[in-house]
Image (cartoon, rainbow, N blue to C red):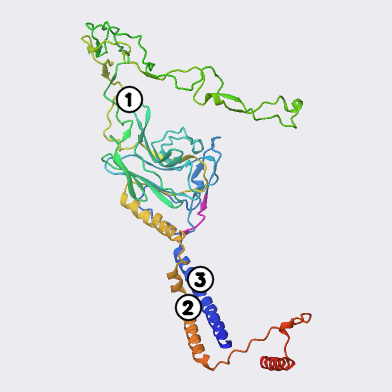
């Protein structure tokens, strides 16, 4: 028995020892995996050669960007690192506080549209606190000599582009402002079939490419999410209609626009009675047996109820017995009315049948005249001058980051820039995402702790075999010790024993006590 206990203790010690070793190894593996998953890199400024304008917010970025001085903009941007860095040392433009309005802008070398090259705008956005209600779009515009601090929501822009989410709105805007060369008025042209913004807290790029053939693409993370033609896919259209309704024209007083009329030769039949009701009492119905028309009350006072003995009319008011169904109304009581049926004589109001109206002239419409504001722009892809970019947003969430703005005319250069910035950080962000735990699975447990499990099983098996072989040499079990009576318990007459038997029992008890000692 002692050997078995020692074997079990040894097994437990082995389990603990090897378990601790395995836990140390598992922790080391977890630390290594965490290091690999969070394989951050030191930020290195990307190559910007061949790009028209780039903003990575390196250096003294707030000397290049100017917050709007307008009273409505109560939120102030700042340049800061990300809460969880992927590229160590990289910074971005931060929306610092929730539930505020933000306005900021910066200038760039002027860019005029050209027929032979595309126009590309791309930037990164990260919602560190998510985005339930707010915007993160940008505006491209020509400052036309205005001060940077005067940038506001009413500043005319050429392109508004980027994500926006609140209530029923969840889209990536693309709005093109187009000027009528005759009236000089600007009009917004909206992309109607807009993609949705990703709903997570990772970094994403938003890109717009306007090609020389008027086609365009809206990209998210470099992948096309929407596309179309500037001349066909925007609302209202770029070009107005050639003809419009004549505002001076009105419908003539004798114009007949009813295609049908009552047949003048028809008349109401003589037997047509418009007074007949739709429903009438059923003449075949009879009052049910037991119906009491002389009884009108469906409820009566409960005759078995009595005023409580403690009822005080001065304090409790006049006592009224509860009501019960009137037994005289078991079938029904009160005035009996027969059920109604559809009147077979009913025909309703008579109307003359309709015939074609010989005076019908058709649906009237005003005359069409030439649109005095008509113009035709076959190359809206050639954008007007742009020399500034601004952010004019209201948001209920803080922690929004803007980074790596690019304006270019070479898609390959933009791709190379993206590889050096967004792609590297995005790969790290995905590695930094929490991995689902699988440590509770049986297979993972066996794989992690197979050494202590194997040692424990072997020790238990050896101990069991050893105990089985040694069991034959074990001492026979001791005789049970007779139960002693209490001192105050005297034997019953039938239990009295011979003095000789009593002395033999005492001798046996002494021997047993010596063996136990």
Q: Is residue 22 in view?
A: yes
**Residue linked to disc 2:** 453
Q: The residue tagged with tag 2: helix, strand or loop?
A: helix
Q: Are marks 2 and 1 in contact (CB under 8 Å)?
A: no
| Magenta region includes residue 271 | no
For residue 246, which quarter of the picture? top left
Q: Give the CA distance from mark 3 to mark 2.
A: 19 Å
* 242, 305: nearer the viewer: 305
Q: Is residue 284 above or below residue 144?
A: above
Q: Give the CA distance from mark 3 to mark 1.
A: 74 Å
Q: Give the CA distance from mark 2 to mark 1.
A: 87 Å
* 450, 62: nearer the viewer: 450
Quarter of the picture holding the N terminus: bottom right
The range drawn in magenta is 79-87
Q: The residue tagged with tag 3: helix, strand or loop?
A: helix
Left or right of residue 299, residue 355 in this image: left
**Residue linked to disc 3:** 27
Question: Which of the numbered marks, if any, corresponds to residue 482?
Answer: none
Question: Which of the numbered marks, if any, corresponds to residue 182?
Answer: 1
Q: Position of residue 470 (x, y in %)?
A: 52, 92
């Amino acid at each position: 028995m002692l050997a078995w206990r020692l074997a079990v203790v040894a097994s437990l010690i082995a389990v603990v020892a090897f378990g601790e070793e395995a836990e140390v190894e598992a922790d080391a593996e977890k630390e290594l995996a965490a290091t690999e998953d969070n394989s951050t890199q030191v930020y290195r400024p990307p190559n910007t050669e061949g790009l028209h304008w780039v903003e990575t917010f390196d250096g003294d970025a707030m000397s290049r960007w100017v917050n709007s001085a307008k009273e409505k903009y109560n939120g102030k941007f700042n340049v800061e690192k990300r809460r969880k860095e992927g590229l160590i040392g990289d910074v971005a433009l931060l929306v610092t506080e929730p539930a505020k309005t933000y306005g900021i802008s910066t200038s760039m070398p002027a860019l005029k549209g050209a027929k032979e090259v595309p126009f590309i705008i791309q930037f990164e956005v990260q919602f560190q606190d998510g985005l339930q209600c707010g915007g993160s779009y940008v505006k491209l515009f020509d400052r036309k000599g205005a001060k940077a601090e005067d940038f506001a929501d009413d500043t005319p822009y050429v392109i508004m582009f980027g994500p926006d989410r609140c209530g029923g709105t969840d889209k990536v805007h693309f709005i093109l402002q187009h000027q009528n060369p005759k009236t000089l008025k600007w009009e917004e042209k909206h992309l109607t079939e807009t993609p949705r913004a990703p709903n997570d807290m990772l970094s994403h790029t938003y890109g717009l490419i306007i090609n020389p053939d008027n086609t365009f693409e809206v990209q998210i993370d470099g992948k096309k999410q929407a596309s179309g033609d500037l001349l066909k896919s925007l609302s209202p259209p770029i070009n107005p209609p050639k003809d419009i309704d004549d505002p001076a024209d009105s419908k003539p007083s004798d114009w007949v626009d009813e295609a049908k009329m009552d047949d003048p030769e028809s008349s109401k039949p003589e037997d047509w009675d418009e007074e007949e009701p739709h429903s009438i009492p059923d003449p075949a119905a009879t009052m049910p047996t037991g119906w009491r028309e002389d009884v009108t009350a469906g409820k009566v006072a409960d005759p078995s109820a009595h005023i409580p003995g403690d009822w005080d009319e001065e304090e409790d008011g006049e006592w009224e017995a509860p009501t019960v169904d009137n037994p005289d109304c078991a079938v029904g009581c009160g005035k009996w009315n027969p059920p109604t049926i559809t009147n077979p004589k009913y025909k309703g109001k008579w109307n003359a049948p309709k015939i074609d109206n010989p005076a019908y002239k058709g649906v009237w419409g005003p005359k069409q005249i030439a649109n005095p504001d008509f113009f035709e722009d076959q190359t809206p892809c050639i954008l007007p001058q742009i020399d500034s970019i601004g952010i004019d947003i209201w948001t209920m969430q803080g922690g929004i980051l803007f980074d790596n703005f690019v304006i270019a005319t070479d898609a390959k250069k933009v791709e190379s820039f993206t590889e050096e910035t967004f792609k590297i950080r995005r790969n790290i962000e995905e590695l930094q995402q929490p991995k689902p735990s699988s440590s509770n699975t049986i297979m993972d447990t066996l794989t992690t702790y197979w050494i202590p499990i194997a040692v424990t099983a072997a020790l238990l098996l050896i101990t069991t075999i050893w105990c089985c072989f040694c069991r034959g040499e074990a001492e026979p079990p001791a005789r049970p010790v007779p139960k002693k009576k209490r001192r105050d318990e005297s034997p019953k007459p039938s239990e009295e024993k011979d003095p000789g038997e009593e002395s033999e029992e005492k001798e046996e008890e002494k021997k047993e006590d010596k063996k136990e000692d």
